[in-house]
Image (cartoon, helix red, strand yellow):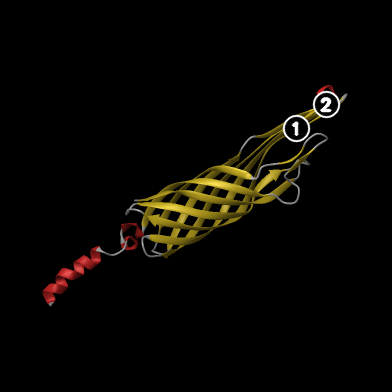
């Protein structure tokens, strides 16, 4: 019986799930593709003139870089840098010699954040987490519009960057495909994280929802 125990116990130790392997504490880095949606409030996304009546796109895309330290099996400290950018939005409307209206718009946001990941280890090499974070953001607004109606003409040019400190809340999961590589998916809500300048030159804070998909490497 003792001989059998000595044979079986090492095999049981080797068969433990990856959650008990060397990635349970240590440094890791990662990169994510990010797809964000701006929660425009009221009619702040509306572009309206004599000829143009449209709304700005609410989609932005980019990336996120992650570096963290797994402190225990249930806690990591993580820092992130991310950038998301909208497509260039533009429109031109003409009434021939009577008039012309046009606009070009672009939004870009950079985020530097730090947060604590509270981790739950699940079977089959999955982990789930919640991560509150403190975010420092910088939002650039580029908006140029011009209008010519008869002998009258006008122009709006907004090229400004605004910074803000915001709170973030992220929920995500990792699947460890090996001892060192984990596929990462997450959803993040950034509260008042995007400070954009409106057509009336008002500074308005908007929420930002982001979906992330990427890969983390554990040393």
Comes first in the chain, label 2 or label 1:
2
In the rendered image of this protein, does residue 168 appear above or below residue 60?
below
Name the residue nearer the viewer: 194 or 171: 171
Residue 46 horizontal side relative to residue 187, left or right: right
**Residue at 41% of width from left, 52% of height from top?**
183
**Residue at 81% of width from left, 23% of height from top?**
96
Count residues near mark 2 (Cα–Cα under 10 Å), then give few for <14, some for 14-19, many for 20+.
Answer: some
Q: Position of residue 207 (x, y in %)?
A: 65, 52
In the rendered image of this protein, does residue 60 appear above or below residue 88?
below
Q: Which residue is mark 1?
A: 145
Q: Nearer the viewer, mark 2 or mark 1?
A: 2
Count residues near mark 1 (Cα–Cα under 10 Å), then give few for <14, some for 14-19, many for 20+.
Answer: many
Question: On the rendered image, what quadrant is the N terminus found in?
Answer: bottom left
Secondary structure, mark 1, is strand
Residue 71 horizontal side relative to residue 109, left or right: left
Q: Position of residue 158 (x, y in %)?
A: 72, 35
In the rendered image of this protein, does residue 145 appear above or below residue 130?
above
Q: Which mark is residue 99?
A: 2
Name the residue nearer the viewer: 192 or 34: 34
Q: Position of residue 15 (x, y in %)?
A: 26, 64
Q: How many marks?
A: 2
Which quadrant of the structure image shows residue 25? bottom left
Q: Which mark is residue 125?
A: none
**Residue at 85% of width from left, 25% of height from top?**
98
Secondary structure, mark 2, is strand
- Circles 2 and 1, Cβ within 8 Å, touching? The answer is no
Q: Position of residue 137 (x, y in %)?
A: 60, 47
Distance from the alpha carbon under mark 2 to that under mark 1: 14 Å
């Amino acid at each position: 019986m003792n001989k059998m125990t000595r044979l079986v116990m090492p095999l049981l130790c080797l068969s433990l799930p990856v959650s008990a392997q060397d990635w349970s504490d240590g440094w890791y880095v990662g990169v994510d593709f990010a797809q964000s949606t701006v929660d425009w409030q009221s009619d702040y996304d509306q572009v309206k003139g004599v000829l143009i009546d449209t709304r700005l796109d609410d989609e932005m895309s980019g990336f996120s870089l992650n570096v963290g330290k797994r402190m225990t099996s249930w806690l990591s400290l993580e820092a992130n840098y991310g950038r998301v950018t909208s497509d260039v939005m533009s429109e031109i409307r003409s009434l021939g010699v009577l008039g012309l209206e046009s606009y070009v718009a672009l939004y870009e946001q950079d985020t530097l954040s730090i947060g604590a990941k509270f981790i739950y280890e699940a079977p089959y090499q999955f982990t789930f987490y919640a991560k509150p974070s403190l975010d420092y953001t910088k939002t650039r607004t580029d908006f140029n519009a011009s209008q010519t109606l008869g002998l009258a003409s006008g122009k709006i040019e907004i090229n400004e960057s605004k910074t803000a400190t915001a709170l973030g809340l992220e929920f995500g999961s990792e699947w460890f495909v090996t001892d060192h590589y984990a596929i990462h998916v997450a959803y993040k809500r950034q509260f008042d994280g995007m400070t954009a300048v409106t057509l009336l030159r008002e500074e308005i804070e908007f929420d930002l929802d982001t979906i992330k998909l990427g890969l983390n490497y554990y040393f």
